[in-house]
Image: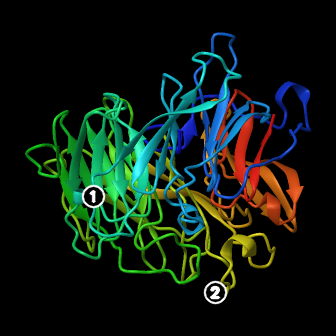
Amino acid sequence: MTHRNSYAQASSPYPGPEKNAVGRTTFSSSATRDTGIGLITLCFSSPYPNGETAVWASTGSYIIKATTSLNYIDKRPKNETISESEKENLLSGAYTLVDNENIFYVPELTGIRAYGDQEENVINSPIDLKRTYDIPAVHLSDAGEVLVGMTITYDGYLAFVTSRGLVGVVSRNFTDAYYYPLTGGDDEQVSNSIACDESGGIYVVSSTNMYRVQWTGSMLSTSEEAGGWIADYESQCAPDDGVSLGVGSGSTPSLMGTDIADDKFVVITDCQDVMNLVIFWRDQIPNDWERLPGIVDRRIAGQVPVTFGNPSTNFTFSEQSVLVRGYGAMVVNNELRNQGTRSPVVASGIDFIAPRGAEKFEWDPSDRSLKSSWANVEVSIPNGIPTMSQKSNLVYGVGHKRTDWSFLALDWTTGEVDFDYPFGTGPRYNSAYAGTEIGRPGQLYTGILTGMTHMS
């Protein structure tokens, strides 16, 4: 699923490739597959009876099922009633997931489509549209509203949010649905996906607020009595460089703190000229916690400027979610070095324009502080979503240098480059907002501008 799990941490317990694994210093990459534009996430099925795994993907025009070597099993056009202009709304359909029954769920404008195998439990079976769900028109606020983010709850429902802040929960057979409109006003917008935890908390960041919408199993609420909350954050900016996909935060909320004894947070970047990494207390605010000086909301546990190692910078921005593992949180720079650029995806592949910089932060529970632990000022992961392997202790992303696009690995502890493996030259290999993912152990996958590729 997008961002790997319902916590939206984008990190994995599985091993990724390593520079010196079993004596190797080079890697092999499969042929790139053309899929059409708009592939953000590759979703991996549970193993079929023969032990193999399928890869599912959604682009602007197609639903795709492939082998882990990215050989096509089937490629099905999307709903033919959708206009070409509607297909260009790539926010709707970007965040997808496969459940434990190997059903592939895809947002499509104001609904969700569930795809599976024509022949159950057969990996080479063609794609079949199993069922469809559409949000009743009475719950939509305007004609342009579309379903943006989606995840799966710990009790097995699909949770979603629309571009105008309608939060919903629907059963996977599409028979039961519940709705809750956010309360940030007529101008409130949502352009990111969502996260959820084991307690039913659904985390949504909008252009105005950070929300915990509590799912009780029979209703949705932001009331504190039900377990929800609403918090302010610094959202008063609208980057005008074409990189941002919406107003307010550019990040899907990521959850930090997994063990029972851990401090637990929801993590975003805000929308200041020099953006901040912001962490909010996820559950009840500790009784002895005092609002931090100059901070807009008591629920904020830490707020630190992201400078990517340049303390004199006047502007930083990221459109990617925060990569989280343990108490660590890493952000990549998406701010183009030419403010006048109007074709940001293409421009991110031009060496003197491509953004540079990555920075990692750590929460210290002993003194309840959030601090920068390292910054790499040279690395360029210009527009893709990075991932991380706990086993390998490496961050992986699609990097750019000169005219080459590459699988890039950074040491999670130090920020130093472990390897930089080029897989293509030129615009077609641009990561174009896609997520880097650890699929089979030791293998990396990513979408690119017009297709998908992987390395092992």
Q: Is residue 416 above or below residue 246?
A: above
x, y (%) of residue 304? 43, 65
Picture residue at 68% right of the left edge, 84% below the top: 341
Q: Is residue 57 above or below residue 329?
A: above
x, y (%) of residue 376? 68, 61
| Res 79 visible | yes
Observer-nearest of 61 and 333 = 61
> Residue pushed farthest bottom?
340
x, y (%) of residue 223? 11, 51
Q: Amino acid at mark 2?
A: Gln
| Residue 439 image label | none
What colour-coding does the image apply?
rainbow
Classify mark 1: helix, strand or loop.
helix
Q: In the displayed structure, does residue 294 sit left or right of residue 146?
A: left
Observer-nearest of 440 and 299 = 440
> Residue pushed farthest front?
81
Q: In the displayed structure, does residue 131 sit left or right of residue 70?
A: left
Classify mark 2: helix, strand or loop.
loop
Quarter of the image for residue 398 reads: bottom right
Q: Nearer the viewer, mark 2 or mark 1?
A: 1
Picture residue at 90% right of the left edge, 28% below the top: 23
| Residue 339 image label | 2
Q: Label 2, label 1: how many angstroms apart (C-alpha)?
A: 40 Å
| Residue holding disc 1 | 137
Q: Amino acid at mark 1?
A: Ala
Picture residue at 77% right of the left edge, 36% below the top: 70
Quarter of the image for residue 313 reads: bottom right
